[in-house]
Amino acid sequence: MSYKVEALPDSYAALGEGPHWDVDRQSLYYVDLESAGINRYDFKQNKVYKSKIEGEEFASFILPVENKPQEFAVGCGRRTVIVQWDGVSAVAKVTRTLFEVEPDRKDNRINDAKTDPNGRFYGGTMATSGDIFTQWNGDLYSWQAGGQPKSIREKVGISNGLAWDVKAKKFYFIDTNNHEVLAYDYNQSTGAVSNPKVVFDLRKIRPEGPLFPDGMTVDTEGNIYVATFNGGTVFKVNPSTGKILLEIKIPTKQITSVAFGGPNLDILYVTTANKFDQPKPAGTTYQVTGLNARGYAGVSLKI
């Protein structure tokens, strides 16, 4: 299969993360995590609009709010806040806090978060100091409108990739520090997840040592796409067998996350990072075409 990897123009983010395709605006939203940056790539204009959230240190994810075109849920520290942004301005403002987790764990922050197919929040935490790859002090949470955040997994190291396959009734989850992808049974009507099983193990793929799985998405055929933070690769995997179907090579090492988008949902967008002095083009956001696969658009958060 011949796929094509191309950089999006002026798409740099020092720690790019959280790509989310919004159908209504034909735009890819993503964050520059450690500088409270929120970005929008406009497909038709082929242009990235960048903004900073006033007074914040982190922006770990960005999720459009249902029926509120200028409101977004963003992860700022341990808070999930509502940010007002017109998608163009260079400054965005927090209007209120939606909810907070772990007020007693000052060293933690929310990391990756997404909405399930019904618009519920799922996301988890991680440590921010020391060797983050050898600590398991976080939790994975779910939240829905009118409720409180609920822990659905404890002793999480770095809470990362999340994906849902409604047809297979599965929820996929990555704790980067465990070098594996878990599949849970998923009840779409209640949002409940149960019975986790390892479906993809990244410990022995490379002879030089374990790979760190990061963000993740699924295609319409039920395959998962796993970004590797230290591997320069996105793996397309059949979760029923654990078999790697394709290695998508990206021209930088720290691959953070993936999301399908574009008018036909057949472009794989890939965020990357420039941590610890990587050579160029680290931190560039890419589009991968020619994969002969389609995914699902992002779902707006119901609040």
Image: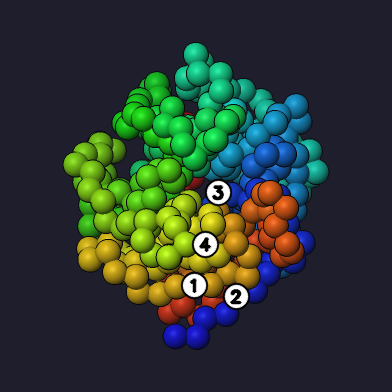
The residue nearer to you, when weighing 118 against 2, is 2
The nearer-to-camera label among 2 and 1 is 1
How dense is the environment of label 1, judged by Cα within 10 Å: few (below 14), some, or many (20 and up)?
some
Residue type pointed to by label 2:
Val
As helix, strand or loop, the secondary structure at mark 4 comes to loop
Residue type pointed to by label 1:
Ile
Pointer 2 or 4: first along the chain: 2
How dense is the environment of label 2, judged by Cα within 10 Å: few (below 14), some, or many (20 and up)?
some
Alpha carbon of mark 2 to alpha carbon of mark 1: how far? 9 Å
Residue identified by numbered label 1: 248
Instruction: Residue 220 in the image: state x and y as whole percent.
Output: 34, 66
Label drawn at residue 267? none
Alpha carbon of mark 4 to alpha carbon of mark 3: how far? 18 Å
Q: Name the quadrant containing residue 244.
A: bottom left
The nearer-to-camera label among 2 and 4 is 4
Residue ranking furthest to the right: 90
Q: Are marks 1 and 4 in contact (CB under 8 Å)?
A: no
As helix, strand or loop, the secondary structure at mark 3 comes to strand
Pointer 4 or 3: first along the chain: 3
Residue type pointed to by label 3:
Gly
Q: Quadrant of the N terminus?
A: bottom left
Instruction: Residue 58 in the image: state x and y as whole percent.
Output: 65, 34
The residue nearer to you, when weighing 191 against 131, is 131
Residue identified by numbered label 3: 18
Pointer 3 or 1: first along the chain: 3
78 lies above or below 63: above
Instruction: Residue 113 in the image: state x and y as whole percent.
Output: 48, 41
* Residue plotted at (79% across, 44% down): 89
Residue identified by numbered label 2: 5
* Residue plotted at (32% across, 32% down): 153
